[in-house]
Amino acid sequence: MLVRAGPLRALVGVQFREGGDADSVPRVFIKTLQDRVLKQEQQEAMLKRWPPALVFALESDHSPFFSMPTLLFAFLLKAVASIKAAT
């Protein structure tokens, strides 16, 4: 009931700026290894097209905020800590 279709039109034509400028934020990617919406090949293509600063792998489906919220939160904390350490 809580899972609804996402706003895909918001992602059409999205462009990421290359890192290095003052307004850029390092990208972090959390791979969802049991995802049936974004297959592993699609996730790998995203990683190649827009390389992130950090990659985490989560043994979760497409919605880790429902299936593994505690572990997702731990990864988000690690991401923030690594970004702060790099700046």
Image: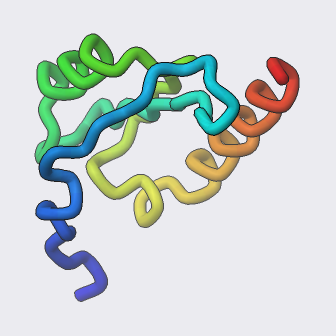
Count of numbered marks: 0
| Res 54 visible | no
Q: Is residue 61 above or below residue 27?
A: below
Q: Nearer the viewer, residue 46 or 58?
A: 46
Front residue of 58/18: it is 18
| Quarter placement of the N terminus | bottom left
Q: Which residue is nearer to you in this view: 12 or 27?
A: 12
Classify 39 as above or below 11.
Answer: above
The residue lying at 18 percent from left, 18 percent from top is 45
User: Residue 67: x and y, percent?
Assistant: 42, 59
Q: Position of residue 70 (x, y in %)?
A: 63, 55
Which residue of the protein is positioned furthest toward the bottom in this rendering?
1
Q: Residue furthest top?
A: 48
Task: Name the residue at 50% across, 54% down.
Answer: 68
The picture places residue 5, in percent across and down from the top left corner, at 15, 73
Q: Where, quadrant-wise, is the C terminus in this rendering? A: top right
Q: Is residue 33 above or below residue 67?
A: above
Question: Is 74 on the left-hand or right-hand side of 34?
Answer: right
Q: Which color scheme is applied?
A: rainbow
Picture quarter containing residue 51? Answer: top left
Q: Position of residue 62 (x, y in %)?
A: 27, 50
From the viewer's side, name the closer residue of 78 and 13.
Answer: 13
Would residue 11 appear left or right of 52 to someone viewing this image? Answer: left
Residue 15 vs residue 85: left or right? left
Res 25 → quadrant: top right
Answer with the quarter of the image where residue 50 lies.
top left
